[in-house]
Image (cartoon, grey):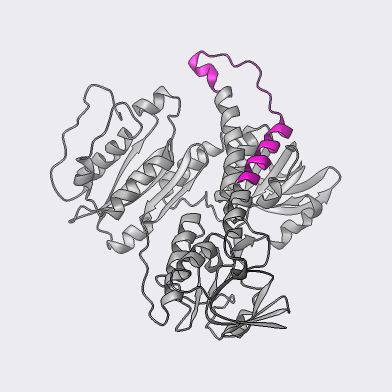
Amino acid sequence: MEKREVDVAIIGAGTAGMVAYQRVRKATDNVVLIEGDQYGTTCARVGCMPSKLLLAAADSAYQMAQADMFGVSAGKISVDGKRVMARVRSERDRFVDSVIRSVEAFPEEHRLKGHARFDGPNRLIVDNETEIHAQRIIIATGSRPNIPGFLKEAKDRLVVNDDIFEWQDLPESVVVFGPGVIGLELGQALSRLGVRVRMFGVGGAVGPIQDDSIREYALKRFNEEFPLDPDGDVKRVERVDGGVAVTFTDGRAGEKTEIFEYLLAATGRRPNVDGLDIQNADIELDEKGMPLFDPHTLRCGQSHIFIAGDANNDLPLLHEAADEGRIAGNNAASYPEVRAGKRSTPLAVVFTDPQIASVGLTIDEVDKHCAGRFAVGEVSFENQGRSRVIGKNSGLLRVYGEHGSGLFMGAEMFGPAAEHIAHLLAWSAQRRLTVSEMLEMPFYHPVIEEGVRTALKDLNRNLNIGPVPEDDCTDCGPGV
C-alpha cells in the first residue's frame, strides 16, 4: 500500500472542499484533495444550476400563458419536452465542465480519486490502496437524497432530483413527496410545463417558511396551480401497471387513489459521513453518528478534524458551503491556532413563483432574541403599484424590528423579486441598520422595492421608538 504524509487532507472536492483547498494552499503545499466520485459540485450537477434551467423553461411557458391579461394573444402554447430537457442537460454540462476544469487545474500531486475512510484519528485509507497520514483533516463530503422507506415501494418509478435532469423527455404526471425547497421548485416547474403534479408533505411545512401568515398565503397560492397537502394522510404507495399508485385521504372525497408516471422523493438530504468509518476518528458523535462541531470554527471538539459544507448538515446552501470551506481551510492551515470565522447574515431564496426569501433571524428567533420585545411590519403585494403593472401582484412581506434599539432583525417574504429584495434586506441586517436608517435610503418610483418601504413604515409605526416618517408618495394609491 502506498503511504503518504501530508499536512492537510481534505475529503471531498465539492464547493466546501475546493474553497478549503485554496485556503490551505496559502499556508502549505503539502496537501491532498480526495474525491470519491466524479468532480463537479452538487450545485452544478444536480442542484442550483440544472434546477434553475428547468425553472427558466417553466417561467417562459407561464408568462406566455399569462399574456392575455395584457391584451396580447400568444396563440396555442406548446411545450416540447425533449427540447426542454436537451437544453437543461446541455447547459448543465457547461457548468459542470467549468468546475471540472477548475479542479483539474490543481497540481496533479494534490488530487487523489478514491473513497476515503478513517483508520485512526490521523490516518485515512483510500480504496485500500493508499494510506494517508494527515496532521489535519477536513471533512467536506457533501450530502445525498434521503428517501423514506415506504416511498421505495415505487421501485423503478422512484426518482430524486439527481435523476430528473437526465430525463430525455417530460413525463405525463409526477407525484412529489416533500414540499421543501427542491420539491416546490421542481414540482411547480413541472406543473407549468404541462406535467400533472400532486404534492404531499408531513407536518404542515411549506418550504423553509417559518412565519405562519406567510405560510398560509403561500399554501393557498400554490394550490391554485397544483394540489399541495403539506400534512398529507398517505395510506400506501405501490408500483402498478402504468406507474405508481398513491392512496391518500382527501378531506372532501375521502380515500382515493391516483396513478402517476413517476414519484419524486424530495424528502431532504442526508450528509455523506456514514461511509467514512467516522467512529475511528476519535471525535464525539451525536446519536445519529454525526460529528459534534463548533459552528463558528467548524472544529470537531478539541481535535484536528474540521467539517464543512453539506457534510455537517447545518446550512446546506452553496454560499454557506463556501464560507465554511474558507473557515475550515483557514483553521486547518493555522492549527493549532483556531479562530471563529466571520459568518454572513443568514440569507435563503427559493426560486418558485412567487419566490420565497428569508433574511436574518426568523420570527421565532427574533422572539427568543428580543424576549418578546419586537414588532412586525408587513405589506401585501396585491395592490403594490409596480407589481400590479407587471401582473406579479401576489405575495406578502413581513419585517421584524427590536423595540428600543429599532434594529432591523430579519424578514420573510413570498412575493415578486424576492431574490433581489432579500439581498437589500440582508445587507441592511449585516450592517446593523435601524429601521429608521433603512427608511432614509432612496426608493425609486415605480419599483417593487417600494413595497419594502411600505412594510418598513408599518414596522416603524409599530416600534416603540422615533417618529413615523412622512409618506413620500401620497397620490399613487395604497401600497405603492
Residue name at image x 21 percent, y 50 percent = 434
Rendered view: 117 above or below 345: below
Residue displayed at 62% across by 66% down: 108
The N terminus lies in quadrant: bottom right
| In this picture, residue 262 sits left or right of residue 69 | right
Give the residue drawn at x 68%, y 34%. 84
Instruction: Note whether 466 is above or below 110 in the view shown.
Output: above
Name the residue located 51 percent from the left edge and 42 percent from the top edge.
351
Query: In the rendered image, which quarter is residue 422 located in?
Result: top left
- 240 or 340, which is in the foreground? 340
Magenta residues (range): 66-94
Residue 291 in the image: state x and y as whole percent: 53, 76
- Is 258 inside the magenta-drawn segment? no
276 horizontally vs 213: left or right: right
Q: Position of residue 169 (x, y in %)?
A: 75, 37
Asked whether residue 131 appears in the rendered view, the answer is yes
Main SS, magenta region, reads: helix
Q: Is residue 232 visible?
A: no
Q: Nearer the viewer, residue 222 or 354?
A: 354
Residue 277: image x %, image y %? 65, 79
Quarter residue 413 falls in: top left
Is residue 304 shown left or right of residue 462? right
Residue 88 inside the magenta-drawn segment: yes
Q: Looking at this rendering, what residue extends furthest in the right direction?
A: 241
The quarter holding residue 440 reads top left
Residue 12, position in %: x, y?
59, 67
Question: Which quarter of the rendered picture does the C terminus lie within?
Answer: top left
